[in-house]
Structures are given as structure tokens and as C-alpha cells.
Amino acid sequence: MEIIDITAPTGPASVMWPGQDAPSREYLSHTERGDPSTVTQWTLSAHTGTHVDARMHFIPGGWTMESLKLSRCVGPCLVVDLTHVMGHVGRADLEAAEVAGAARLLLKTRNSEDGLLGRGGFVEDYVAIEREAAEYLVEIGVETVGVDYLSVEPFEDKEFNTHHTLLGADVIVVEGLVLGGVEPGEYLLTCLPLKLEGSDGSPARAILIRGL
Amino acid sequence: MLVRYGWDLRWASGPEGRRFLRDWPGLGGEAECLVEKGVALVGCDTLAVDAVGSQENPAHHALLGSEVYVVENLKNLNRLPPFCLFVALPLKIRGGSGSLVRAGALLPGR
């Protein structure tokens, strides 16, 4: 069995969506200070690094993280290669990639090839999912979609059509996946966010398993 | 190896949760024998793998000292059969002394 960790390391140097602070750490105790144990206390955005959006992130009254159906985040998954797409991912790109039939779909784009999540600063020209492509994902019954930068939304879409389309149709949105070294193909996805009550999202640990 | 004390039944938020924090049991130096048996991970349904009030934290030292992973505050262990596929994925916190974790058990045909 092979486990591939597709989670971005989270810490004070993590790249963040504009306006959100990077995680900060405080040592409540430390063995180097003579304390019996080391305990860190962290402050971090629910949308730090690799994370899952709750429906409530954009849909008023939508479910929050404790109500996430784990079966959506654990199961067979298709990683599809879209690294050739230069603009945002469009409907035609998804059709050409023959993604229909996949319940869980991870989109590997040039974000991964360029290592955007590993860079210090936020970039605006990342690859995201166009509204029509999001509508197509809903149409073909995709239950969970993952992307390799901080948002499924094109940066320039200030109406957040992609989020509204996906979360509105109760598609699970996973953002900030590290897919650089991942070959396209089928895997067992296990993406487990925290069970944060009332939260609009949560950082998650996500892995791909092969040969189970 | 997951240890069920039934303490998760006492878990509650607010004042009711005091029962969870009172007199919880734990492993002591006996944890050493788990290391000898090659256990990779020890989980429990209490706040800590050492019993309440432990000053020396012998279980923490025995387990962490030998790279045995420790998962604390698990819930619903009463719903698990003797053997299952356990999945616990903590966050990938750089420099973290620990992490919150989402833990689950996969059971056949459920």
C-alpha cells in the first residue's frame, strides 16, 4: 500500500488568501523552558492551506463542518491532468479529460507544476474553475471536487459564481491540494477535515492511497 | 491499539463536562510493554494517555520516546468491533507539538 500525502504544510509561512492571516503559534509550555511538556496553541483561518469548504461558506444557512458527510471525502477518486490548460478550467477541458462518472475528482493544473502553494506570496493568476465548468461538474454528478490552489473560484470573479454553483448543489469543495508529484489516475482518497462545530470550513489532512 | 475506558460517554461541553475531566484512568509505565510488542499507535477515549494528575507522565514518555503515536480524546469506541481499519489524519502543522485530528474506523459492509 502506498500513501501519498497531498496536504500543504501549514505554518506561519503558509500562503494565504488576501486578508487572512497566516497561522500563528504560541508556546503555552516548552520542555526547553523546563516545563514537563511542550504545548503549542495556534490561531489559524478555517481556510488555511489544504482545506474543505462547508456549504455555509457561501450559502446562508448551509451546513457547517460537523455535519460533513465523511463518505464524500473517503472513497475512489480520479486525479485528472489539466496541466496543459492555460486559462481557467472550462467545460470543454473537463469533457476532453473524460471525467464523467467520477464521484470524487481532483484537478491537477499548472498551479501544481508551478508550485504555487509552496510560494511565500499569494498569486492572482492561478488556474481555477469557470462557472460553466462548475455547472458541468454538477450536471455529471461529481460529489467532491478538489483543486491545487486556494480557491475553486477564478480570482477575477467577484460574484463567486463557481462557489455558488458547487456549494449550492452540495458538491464538496476541497482547496489547496498538493498534486505536483501525483500521476493522474485512480486512487482511494481520504480527506479528513476537523469536526469544527459551526465552522464555515476546516483545514484537512488529505491523502491518496494506492494498492490497498 | 485503541483503549476504551468508556470515558467518552462522559464527554460534554460546559459544566457537564467536568465528569470527563475528573479521575480519568490511564496507562502508566505499563505502556512500556506496548512498545515491546511493537504497537505503532495507542489511542484512548480520555483526555490523556496518562492517568489524571500524573506528574511523571510515564505513558507519554514510554510511547513518544519510542516513536509510538498517541491519539487522545477519541469517541464512539463502543461502536467498534475488536478489529477494524483505523484512520486518523491530523493536520500537517509545521512545528506543531500536536494537532487536532479527524479519526474514523472503516468497517466492512456498513
Image (tube, coloured by chain):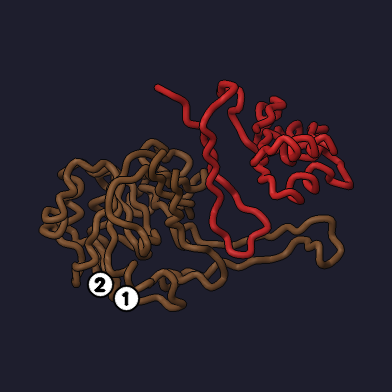
Chain colours: A brown, B red
A211 to the left or right of B44 = left
Please give the label number shown on residue B72.
Answer: none
A60 or A169, nearer to the observer: A169
Residue A149 appears in view: yes
SS at mark 1?
Answer: loop
* Quadrant in the picture for the C terminus of chain A: top left
Residue A29 in picture, x, y percent from top left: 78, 61
Callout 1 amino acid: Glu
A64 to the left or right of A114 = right
Specify the subunit that label 2 lies on. A
Mark 1: give few (<14), some (14-19) or many (20+) Cα within 10 Å. Answer: few
Nearer to us of marks 2 and 1 is: 1
The residue most toward the right is B55
| Occupied quadrant, residue A182 | bottom left
* Quadrant in the picture for the N terminus of chain A: top left
SS at mark 2?
Answer: loop
Q: CA gap, disc 2 to disc 1?
A: 8 Å
Q: Residue at x 89, y 46 (%)?
A: B55
A59 or B32, nearer to the observer: B32
Specify the subunit that label 1 lies on. A
Residue A96 in picture, x, y percent from top left: 11, 56
Q: Is residue A189 above or below residue A22?
A: above
**Tags 2 and 1 touching, CB below 8 Å:** yes
Callout 2 amino acid: Glu
Please give the label number shown on residue A124.
Answer: 1
Does mark 1 fall on the same chain as mark 2? yes
Q: On the image, numbered disc 2 is attached to which residue?
A: A156
A164 to the left or right of B5 = left
Residue A167 appears in view: no
